[in-house]
Image: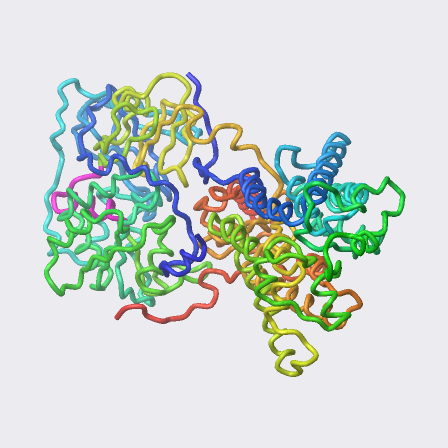
Amino acid sequence: MKLLNFLRGEAFARGVHPPQHKDTAAMPISRLPFAQRLVVPLSQNVGRPARPVVQVGQEVLRGQPLAEADGFVSAPHHAPASGVVEAIRLHPTSGGPWTDSVIVKVHPGSTQAVEWEEPQDLSAMDADQLIAAVQRTGIVGLGGGVFPTHAKLRVPKEFPVDTLVVNGCECEPYLTSDHRIMVERAADILAGVAISRRLLGNPRAIIGIEDNKPDAAAAIRALLPFGGDVTVETVPTKYPQGAGEMLIKTLLGREVPPDSRSYQVGAYVQNVATLASMGALMPRGRGFIERVITVAGTAVARPGNYLVPMGTPLRFLLEHVGAPADSVEVIFGGPMMGQAVACLDAPITKGVSGILVFHGQDLAPRAVRKSFPCIKCGKCIESCPMGLNPSMLGMLAAKRQYGPMAAAYRLGACFECGTCSYVCPANIPLVQQFRVAKQVLRGSEKAA
Amino acid sequence: MTVEIHSAPHIKADDGVVKIMRNVVWSLLPICAFFVWQYGASALASLIVVTAACLAAEALFLRLGRQSGDLGDWSATITGLLLALTLPPGFPLWMGAVAGFVAIALGKAIFGGVGHNLFNPALVGRAFVQAAFPVAIGTYTPSFMPGRFAEFIPSSLAPPFMAPKDTVAWLLASHVDGVSGATPLARWKFEGVLASSFDLLTSVSGHMAIGPSPLLILLCGGYLAARGYLDWRIPAAVMGSAAALATVMFAIDWRHYPDPLFVLFSGGLVLGAVYMATDMVTSPVTPKGMWLYGALIGVLTVIIRYSGGLPEGVMYAILIGNAATPMIERISQPAAFGANVKRKEKRP
């Protein structure tokens, strides 16, 4: 197997091929109805929480701003449905902690039509105005990064970007939302690409799509002029191809050095869903109030790609897709990097690309999770895309020698793709230990 | 309603330690069968007794506690089968039991069990009996003796703590003329007689004191490598470096040194390269380290064979390689992504 991989000449080194389970790939995007109440947390993304601009008891229209950005690295939020602001109070989130949230009681007659928009002429705007327009939409990195998109678009002048890398890989198993967006909303993506290119100094754009989605590549290619500055490249299907560094390596042959940003090698990565939202919302001056989410997993009776209003309580969605009310495991995101949800009352927020629901024992039976000592098989080293030595890191973590992990074995380069834990035949919770180690190190840095 | 929470990743590859070990055992079975076909009842008894001794020792130390692993993880079974394959088929069974016990006790249990040992347990056991019973371990018998399924090689059944019967006398009194109990390596070293490399590779032509066919071992190892349970780089490095050094020596003085094919297929080089050197626990975990480690073992094997007092050097070469593993790992850490940035464009 190893020899075959070597001969095949895959793009970035190492990586893994987990079973794909992309059963929802052919299911068109369909709308999810409104829940009775929608919960919009003020803090959904990297940066400062937004400041509410509505009062309790106020009537809001679908698309109307609920909260404004507080500073540059911050994103506003908009009313996902017409209704009345019932409360602004603490509410549980998927991660566990309770955060301030605007709770909108949806009018029974609220339609899916957007009732608040300010159409604008983008071509008349200069760069600063355009970035402000991006910020007004409230779009954040939809691939899971949840970094405010407008802030990411302000690239320091001393680093010229020569390539906009459009990430259409969707390398996580089960997830097909980006796939459907590429098939159904290719024009929106290209509109978003055009806006981003203007802000980045008109670099060429390469749309990288894993070769398991030929229909997505074809849908976008059909709209592209021959010999233009925007091209589509299919890349090998391999996890974690969708990580920015890996896609840059595959498409451009460049490696982003440790502790550097991708623009330092002249590349800028943006996810297709993010670009499609920019392209669809910005000309109309709309806010980001819904996104496409793949709902799948063994416990889901009606899996699919749903257009979900932001703030929909998870419990409502589970009822709608026919997930049973017994023992389940719910994951926001993909099975490799996604986050298990502790509270079913948590609202669905901007960073959620998939919702996977499994019966309690389906993912990995308890017997499989029994942990052995490391037998030094080297599978983790063979698959770590960052060229780390997870085996050694794991042994150090078990002894709580967190300092050497960072200093001698480059723990900081780990972006927690989970590949090492996935392959480990001894079931050592490697990436889980690394997360703890990073947290401890961050804590001691702060203390120092 | 219960909500289960786990830390990502939420899915696992299918491979587990037990599955890997079980596959190694499967792949060893044809080799063991070939060994029994070559040597008959004595070989079968040796395989059973040595493996049973390993399992008994494993059970004892697991019961004493503070050991990782369990009896069902197949690791002690692998140790037992491999150890038996490296012993002469007529090795007294009680000595085989001692070897098996020592392999687990000194090779594995004192380090804390599976995953913690520094040296290949099977080779620790063999090294122990090599020192303790040098005559018995140097006494080989020819393969494919007539009547090998009907009677034991007399030394097999030596009563515990008693010297075995004289195998040479038994051989002289026996059935076939012109056979020798010396291994091809010993015959080359002490008598200057070279065996045919093809006969060594297949090991089906009779009356040579040889182990299971290197060809069969390579096939079984190839199965494991294809499943991803064995790293092909280690046997490649061991055999490649041994062949390279042997070629150089052969080119320098072809009268004195054997040809590289003889070096590859005689003795335990293939078995050691494919099944012993590749023991995951005691070999380097880094890809570069595997090449270094394999090359070290191959070179040491040839040096010990050519200039040591013993005809065979694979065992000590691997044990030295095991000892060097922590150092090799230290100097062979994988290259970090983006550490040496080449500003080379892949496409215009």
Q: Quadrant of residue A185?
A: top left
Q: Answer with left or right where residue A273 lies relative to residue B200.
A: left
Residue depicted at x 33% and y 56%: A247
Q: Looking at the image, which is closer to me, A103 or B49? A: B49
Q: Say above or below: B248 vs A417.
A: below
Q: Is residue A151 above or below residue B6?
A: below
Q: Is residue B153 magenta?
A: no
**Residue in the foreground of this view, choosing between A287 and A348:** A348
* The furthest residue to the bottom: B252
Residue B149 vertical position relative to residue A267 in the rendered view, above or below: above
Give left or right: position of B179 versus A103: right
Q: Residue at x 71, y 55 (%)?
A: B142
Q: Residue at x 43, y 22 (%)?
A: B3
Can residue A447 be seen here? no
Magenta residue span:
A271-288
Query: Which x, y percent locates residue A207?
Result: 23, 55
- Out of A315 and B306, give the one closest to the viewer: B306
- Furthest toward the right, the residue is B162
